[in-house]
Amino acid sequence: MPAQVSCVSRQHYPTQCHSDNVLYNTDCCHNGLGDVCDHDDSMRFEAVFIPVLYSVALVVGLLGNGLVLGVLAQRKRVWSVTDNFILHLAVADSLLLLTLPFWAVEAAQEEGWSFGTPLCKITGAMFTINFYCGIFLLACISLDRYMSIIHATQMYSRRKPWLVHASCLSVWLFSLLLTLPDWVFLEAAADDRRSKTECVHNYLLFSQSASKWRLASRLLYHLVGFLLPSVVMLFCYSCILLRLMRGSQGRQKQRAIRVILALVAVFFLCWTPYNITLMVDTIQSNSTREGCGMKTHLEKALTVTSSLGYLHCSLNPVLYAFVGVKFRRQLLDILRYLGCRLKMGASFKSAASSRRSSTWSESADTSNSIAI
């Protein structure tokens, strides 16, 4: 049985984006005015909104990322440096999408999380690894493009493939290191406020410093998971755009950059609203005058904006298809090849059927001739 915890902390998991509360100044089951807050409204909203949205994201994302991996497999002999990073990005997105059904079930069920604490830790850590991998890989791609275009220096080259693999391995290991708080604090805890069990960070394990752990967790996510990679990408692509505007690069280079710019732009469109809402929630959680109305609105806002962020995993393949000319051409080649195989298969079946029909007719005629 999960530990009975009256108030637990929700980080950046799909269904845990309400108020990231702990017991420090006031009882988080109440607002600052002493009134008990009703969470039924936000729970009903999540029970419908999250399962529907995550089901769509899962189907579209797995199909799209599967196509990306298929295209990359077809052209493995001519992979560029960026293709190596995109391969790891597609894997990270796919693994993150595989965690969404657990969060959808948690939101839909009245009893909440029913998979136990061990799976809670594994699923939460898996989510964190792939979330951080996604943005770190985008930062690596931007650095590679920056060095190549601005300084005419190949940060990575085909002659040293081990360097690319070492960079990707470092990204995965660093992302794994960032999951340590998940392994320590995540548990299936019964939340008395919402009358259900949820997979959440229980910072009350260290009750004397619970608020400090909560704040440290928020700062780690904002600084390492969003602000630092964002600054790197903004700097690199601002310099690249200035160079491209001077016309120093050909159309092929511009098309390649257009794909990556679209990836980064969509990343910011998907994740910036959630980070802003999360910052507001952090400030409001420290306020002793926070009303129940504000709590409810923040819970809904965090649910919507976090869901927008998780849709990012499904949008990357769409961008490859509509923005990347090379990807679109190779995908069409694969579809034509599959279409030809299907047509050949249909023609073969038709020919075989006609041969069987002809053989049957000939045998019938022979039997008739014998009978006569």
Image: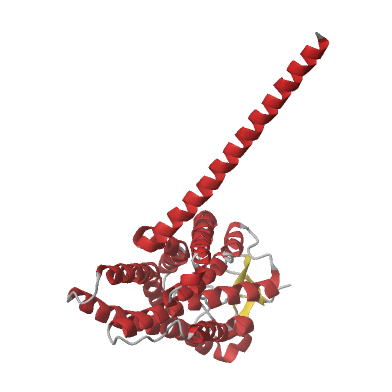
Q: Closest to the observer: 106 or 89?
A: 89
- Image check: 104 left or right of 81? right
Q: Is residue 54 visible?
A: yes
Q: Closest to the observer: 19 or 126?
A: 126
Q: Closest to the observer: 80 or 176?
A: 80
The picture places residue 106, in percent across and down from the top left corner, at 61, 62
- Give the farthest residue toward the left: 246
Compared with 67, 81 (above or below) is: below
- Give the farthest residue toward the right: 371
Compared with 162, 97 (above or below) is: above
- Image check: 262 left or right of 344? left
Residue at coordinates 59% horizontally, 61% vertically from top-left? 101
- Give the farthest residue toward the top: 372
Residue 254 location, quadrant: bottom left
Residue 141 location, quadrant: bottom left
The picture places residue 291, in percent across and down from the top left corner, at 42, 70
Residue at coordinates 50% horizontally, 59% vertically from top-left? 67
Q: Closest to the observer: 353 or 119?
A: 353
Total numbered labels placed on residues in the image: 0
Locate the N terminus and report the quarter of the image it occupies: bottom right
Compared with 53, 189 (above or below) is: below
Locate the C terminus and report the quarter of the image it occupies: top right
Q: How is the image coloured?
A: secondary structure
Q: Is residue 287 visible?
A: no
Residue at coordinates 61% horizontally, 69% vertically from top-left? 198
The picture places residue 186, in percent across and down from the top left corner, at 62, 78
Residue 181 location, quadrant: bottom right
The picture places residue 260, in percent across and down from the top left corner, at 36, 71
